[in-house]
Image: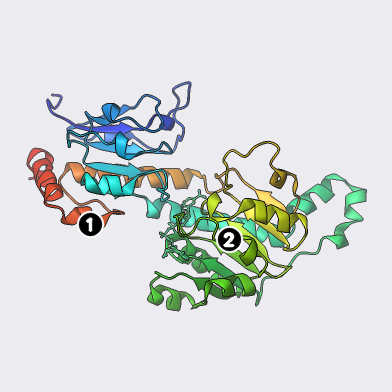
Amino acid sequence: MPESNPFRVALSSDFRQPDGSPTFRDFDLAPLKDAAGVEMAFLDEANPLRADQLADFDALILLAHRLTAESIPANGRLAVVARFGVGYDTVDVPALTRACIPLVITPDGVRRPVAVSILTLMLALTGKLLAKDRLTRMAAAGFAQRNQHMGIGLVGRTLGSVGIGNIGAEMFRLAKPLDMRFIAHDPYADPKVAAELGVEFVALDEVFRQADILCVNCPLSEGTRHLVNAERLALMKPTAYLINTARGPIVDQRALTAVLAAGRIAGAGLDVLEQEPPDPDDPILKLDNAILTPHALCWTDQCFAGNGAADVRAVLEVQRGNVPRGVVNREVLEDPRWTARLEGYRRRFGAG
Ligand SMILES: NC(=O)c1ccc[n+]([C@@H]2O[C@H](COP(=O)([O-])OP(=O)(O)OC[C@H]3O[C@@H](n4cnc5c(N)ncnc54)[C@H](O)[C@@H]3O)[C@@H](O)[C@H]2O)c1
């Protein structure tokens, strides 16, 4: 018998393509559809989301649409927002905190796929993969130019990171067998994790000065916007590569384009740009010392399955009256309104 007062879960409309098919086939919704007392529905297209769309839901699973203070219904029903992924610059977190709504992210889903993306870019850049692909397609004329495209061996070279959190740490973990030197700057990182991974902390400018491969692994915030700017790019070795898989606006792209065009650094691997999609006339698209991917290098079957499973787990935990994993605004968990809300769900849906 259908539950008369079900736990209602909304999915943002970008989880479906215009023809109604799923955006990510590996996001398995069955555990949500099959859960007792749960009803799910896709929202209509709106960006930012509107409060009237969300008023009749207990939970929201959110892809890329913006969630602002105005998106939060005043009736107090919405109890959890689960972002598909770990970036949340599209979400007004203080507004959610004021409304006592936890924001959940999925670090377990993206950790390995994004770290693998960074290694993909590092190996492709230093191995001159794209240039050598082009040479091969030129047959004999390309083979004749092979010695002009020497790669860079990685043993003893310095892998640097701005940020050593979920993804930064996994990047170092995966790079361990490459026998590189590891350095990082992160004012808030756990020194134990760094020590375990053999990562030496250095000042921010020193990461730029010393790294042969410099990776951006911090969140986008007002403090990190254009953290990679002309002054810091000028500190980099002419043989160094910059890799950004974090967020485009952390890098001043105009300044980066200038140093790449001038050959002031060896190259860049960018999964993220300041404007996505880029303007077709953006000069960075013309540079052959940059490898560019459309904010999707980590998109694999396992990444989406992992993010989806984590979000579904989180909303079902809340339905049962439990605290979900991956809460960003943890102060909500101390709020008596949250405790009361969980107690209500536990009474209605909790096991036993
Ligand atoms: N390309 C993609 O598809 C993709 C997918 C997932 C995540 N990301 C991005 O990857 C980045 C890292 O994600 P994460 O899960 O590792 O996040 P995280 O929060 O676990 O780690 C970020 C680290 O950056 C550090 N940090 C914050 N401000 C800093 C500063 N000013 N200087 C140096 N370090 C600073 C934090 O202390 C933290 O240790 C985020 O920007 C996220 O949006 C991109």
Q: On the rendering, which quadrant does ligand 1 occupy? A: bottom left
Q: Nearer the viewer, mark 2 or mark 1?
A: 2
For the N terminus, the quadrant is top left
Q: In percent of the image, x 41 and y 36: which residue is there?
A: 65
Percent position (x, y) of residue 30? 32, 34
For the C terminus, the quadrant is top left
44 up-or-down from 232: above or below: above
User: Is disc 1 surrounded by few (<14), some (14 to 19) or many (20+) residues within 10 Å?
Assistant: few
Visual colour scheme: rainbow
**Viewer-nearest residue: 205 or 241:** 205
The answer to whether residue 31 of the structure is visible from this angle is no
Q: In percent of the image, x 44 and y 43: which residue is there?
A: 304
Task: Compare marks 2 and 1 and give the one earlier in the sequence.
Answer: 2
Percent position (x, y) of residue 346? 10, 44
241 up-or-down from 25: above or below: below
On the image, numbered disc 1 is attached to which residue?
Answer: 331
Percent position (x, y) of residue 22? 44, 29
Q: Are marks 2 and 1 in contact (CB under 8 Å)?
A: no
Percent position (x, y) of residue 115? 51, 58
Q: In percent of the image, x 47 and y 54: which residue is there?
A: 220
Indicate the amino acid at tag 1. Glu
Q: Is mark 1 within 8 Å of ligand 1?
A: no
Q: Is residue 111 left or right of residue 37?
A: right
User: Is disc 2 surrounded by few (<14), some (14 to 19) or many (20+) residues within 10 Å?
Assistant: many
148 up-or-down from 157: above or below: above
Q: Is residue 93 left or right of residue 176?
A: left
On the image, numbered disc 2 is attached to which residue?
Answer: 228
**Viewer-nearest residue: 168 or 55:** 55
Indicate the amino acid at tag 2. Val
Q: In percent of the image, x 50 and y 71: which residue is there?
A: 185
How many numbered marks, from 0 up? 2
